[in-house]
Image: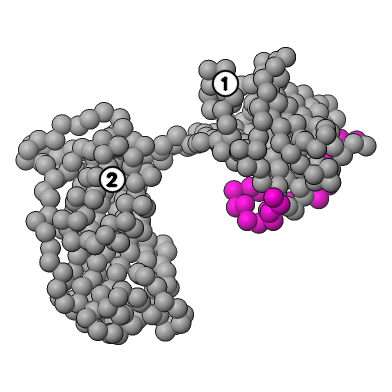
Amino acid sequence: MVRNSKTICCVLLAATAVLFCAGCSRKFTCSSDNLMGFEGYYYEDGELYVVFDEDNIDDVMEHSVYEDEEWREWDEIYVHLGDDVYEVDSDDVDVDVSHGQLLISFEMDKADAGKITGFYFDVDYCHYLLDLENGKLKIEIEGGDCKEYYSQNYDPKTDEWSEPDYEYKDYSYVDDVVTEKPVIYLYPTEETDVTVTLDLDGEMTCTYPEYGSGWNVTASPDGKIYDPNTERYYDYLFWEGTRSFDLYEFKNYACVPGEDTAVFLESYLEAAGLNDSEIDDFISYWLPRMQESPYNLISFPSDEYNDWAKLDVSPEPDTLIRVYMVFAPVDEPVEVPESNALIMPSGIEREGFTVVEWGGSVLYDVTIAAN
C-alpha cells in the first residue's frame, strides 16, 4: 500500500534521488558499524530483503527489538519512496536469523524497490528512522517520563558511520502540568441558547470548537451542540490548558493496581453521576495510559479544580457535575491511611438542565499528605 508521506507525521523525509548505490537501483550496502547493525537491502524474486548484522547490533537495538536472541515483530514498517511511503503490514513480514544475519523480507513491486530512499521501523516504545538519501540514522526510545535519542551520520565516500550522538530528556520535573481533554456536555430540557465561559488560572492551549471569548451555542436535550460560527454539530465542547504547580500533594486518594483501573473508574464515575456514554469517553481516553503502570495513585480534587478552573454557564444549570482526576503512576503499592482514603461520591441525581464536564492530569513530581 502506498501512502503520501504527508500522512505519516512522525517521518521527516523529503526525497527524490536514489540512495548512494552507484548504477544500481535495487540494492544498497553499507558498513554495519551502526546502532542497528543495518548493512543494506536487496530485491529478489518479488521480495525486498532488509539485512542486519547480528553480531553488530548495539545494546540500544538489542534491548528493544532483539531480546533473548529472538527478533521481535515490528509494529509498523514504512518504506520511503521519494515523496511516497509504502506501508508494510506486520503480518506480511518474514524474519530469518541465520549465518550471523537477520533478514526481514516482504513482498514489494519491482518498480517501488527502485525508488527506496529510507525506512521507518516502529516497535513498541522504540522508533527507528533510516534516512538513506541523507545518510542519517535516528532512534527515539520512550520510557515513561523520559526519552532517549540516538543519531548517527553515514559518509558514502568512506563507508563509515560517525560516533553516535546521544541525548537524554527527563520530563519528570515539569512546572507546567497539562489539564488534558476537559470536555463539557450540555443537556437542556429543551433546545436552548447557551453561553459557556471558563476562567482558568493558567493558559488555554487548545479548544474545539474555537473558544474565542466564550462558546455561544445552541444545545438540544439529546446532547447535540450546534455552533452557529462553524455551522457544525458537536457532542461536547473541548478545551485543554496548562497550569503551574510547585509540588502537588495527594490528600485524599486511592492506590489502584493498573489492571484494576477500568473497574475502579467505572465505579467512581457512575457514583459521580456520569452516564454510560460519558464513562466510556472518559475511560477510553485514560485507560491506555493507566493500565500499563503497576499501580496508580488516583485523586479527584474537585474543590481545587473549581478554584482554578471556574466554569460559568448561562442559563445556570440545575445540575452541574465536574470530574477532574489527577493520577501518578508508581512502581510499588502505597499504603493509604484511613484519614487520606478517597471518598467515593454519594450519588448525584441529574435533574433539569444538566452540565457535565470531565478532565484530568498525570503528574510525576508529587508528595503524599501527612496523616
The reply to whether residue 307 is in sight is no
Assign a secondary structure to mark 2. helix
The structure residue drawn at horizontal position 18% and vertical position 41%, both measured from the top left corner, is 254
The first of marks 2 and 1 along the sequence is 1
The structure residue drawn at horizontal position 22% and vertical position 81%, both measured from the top left corner, is 189
Question: Is residue 61 in the magenta section?
Answer: no
Amino acid type shown at disc 1: Glu
| Majority secondary structure in the magenta region | loop
Assign a secondary structure to mark 1. strand
Name the residue that disc number 2 marks: 262
The structure residue drawn at horizontal position 41% and vertical position 37%, both measured from the top left corner, is 144
Task: Please tell me the numbered disc located at residue 247.
Answer: none
Work out which quarter of the rendered image holds the C terminus and state it.
top left
Q: Residues within 10 Å of mark 1 (few under 14, many from 20)?
A: few
Residue interval drawn in magenta: 1-22
Residue 166, image x, y percentages:
57, 31
